[in-house]
Amino acid sequence: MGASAPGMWTADEIARLCYAHYSVRLPKQGKPEPKREWTLLAAVVKIQSPANQACDTTDKGVPVTKEVVSMGTGTKCIGQSKMRKSGDILNDSHAEIIARRSFQRYLLHQLHLAAVLKEDSIFVPGTQRGLWKLRPDLSFVFFSSHTPCGDASIIPMLEFEEQPCCPVIRNWANNSPVEKSDNLEDSKKSDNLEDSKNKRDCEDPGSSVAKKMRLGTSSMMLSNSIAHHGTQESGTIKPDVSSSNLTKEELDTANAVAPGSFKVVDVYRTGAKCVPGETGDLRKPGVAYHQVGLLRVKPGRGDRTCSMSCSDKMARWNVLGCQGALLMHFLEEPIYLSAVVIGKCPYSQEAMRRALTGRCQEVLALPRGFGVPELKIEQSGLLFEQSRCAVQEQRAADTPGRLVPCGAAISWSAVPEHPLDVTANGFPQGTTKKEIGSPRARSQISKVELFRSFQKLLSSIAEDKQPDSVRVQKLDTYHEYKEAASAYQQAWSALRRKPPFASWIRNPPDYHQFK
């Protein structure tokens, strides 16, 4: 895959392009209600480099084409009890995941242009029958208005900063430790009650926490998302970092004095919970609250989710590619991101590197074409205007009602037909209970619809020009087609042999048996 030449773009240029696309190209439908709701934004930007990729285009003025090819907004996940075996619901509607699924839609369209219509496309023929590869002058940059939830959000906090929300566990004030419940159901109820109360307190403008958020000295450093950054009130207790599982560099930072003579006294929290049954967080005061480097599951409101955190999913993309298993039937090599750009929000370069690339190093026995490519990670200084932090600042102190996350998710793809897709609770916005189960009640980026698009592409190609992986055996279900992408599955198996990825929560096969 083509890599971006140095100086081809800046983080602010990528952020500005995405914010403009959101404002101009996306209609009002699905966007937050002004001063009452906030959301998160993610996108994939196509970078077309000049013929001589080695040149520094900033200095020499050679034109570089930057184009948003997919975009997503959203903050929600559905609980485990709402998952469906028909593949017609979106389990995970966090912005990053919506943007990536929208990108898969774009890739399917580009493969249709190349393989069926023989028109100009991002793909050129590969060396094997029926396979394609990305044009060498193209690369893709992933943009997110916020730090991904999970491991990348566990960020050192200086003593003048405040946690964006109230404590997950209030017993610290009484020095009473919280013990792990042997009864999973009891612990689930306890966690969910605690989470919902915390979120209500944080969203209530009259609460002491919300007042602290408005009056705090570092309001620009507030979290963009309760789900993405969790909770604690900083105390005067010296953080215990002895068993926090931080890297040596992070321990040094935590125990030292930061630039400007501010001590690192805590870490930003993530609402994502450790995978059940695996090593858990220490939940000690200060820096030792979280253990870093672990896999995490997104929180749900009253119902646990099976969705891995965005940090974990993005780390996986850095080994397996963004295209998924189905599209690997048509590709000679995975589609990797060349860079990740994060908007203005609480941020740590060390945490981002640890979460997205550090955990993937030295994965052994990857099949040909797969690897762990270098990932450029940068932050923009530009704030997303509909982030939680920005909306909080826009609100007057006497604004009625709570500030809440927008319930809708927007998907946009650079495709000619129905580029926009707005969902709520995993279904197209406005879907009635009676409609659920019908084709009209499916998002364009649901598993079943992406599978339908894949099958349509396959059936449009003459059999003697189809890839060998789909010709040598009779395949029927979504599960069978995914498993038949052998190189992809080998790479996924290799990644799961490396800690912490062995604890990845996988949906049971019966959730993938639809046709």
Image (cartoon, helix red, strand yellow):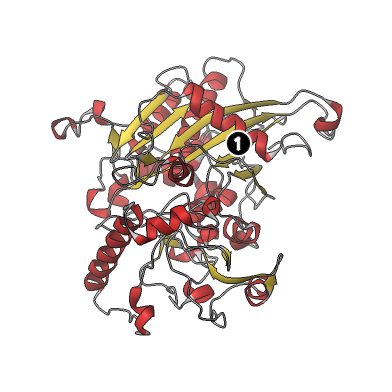
The N terminus sits in image quarter: top right
Q: Work out which quarter of the rendered image holds the C terminus and state it.
A: top left
Considering only vertical position in the picture, is 226 above or below 136? below
Residue type of the residue flagged with mark 1:
Ala
Residue ID for mark 1: 15
Q: Dot 1: what SS?
A: helix
Q: Is residue 504 visible?
A: no
Q: Position of residue 80 (x, y in %)?
A: 27, 54
In this orientation, does residue 178 appear? yes
Q: Position of residue 344 (x, y in %)?
A: 58, 46
Give the left or right position of residue 384, taking residue 392 as reference.
right
Q: Residue visible at 58% across and 69% down?
A: 159
The residue located at (67%, 32%) in the rendering is: 127
Rendered position, 499 above or below 172: above
Q: Residue at x 50, y 56 (%)?
A: 312
Quarter of the rendering containing residue 249: bottom right
Residue 144 on image: x %, y %: 54, 43
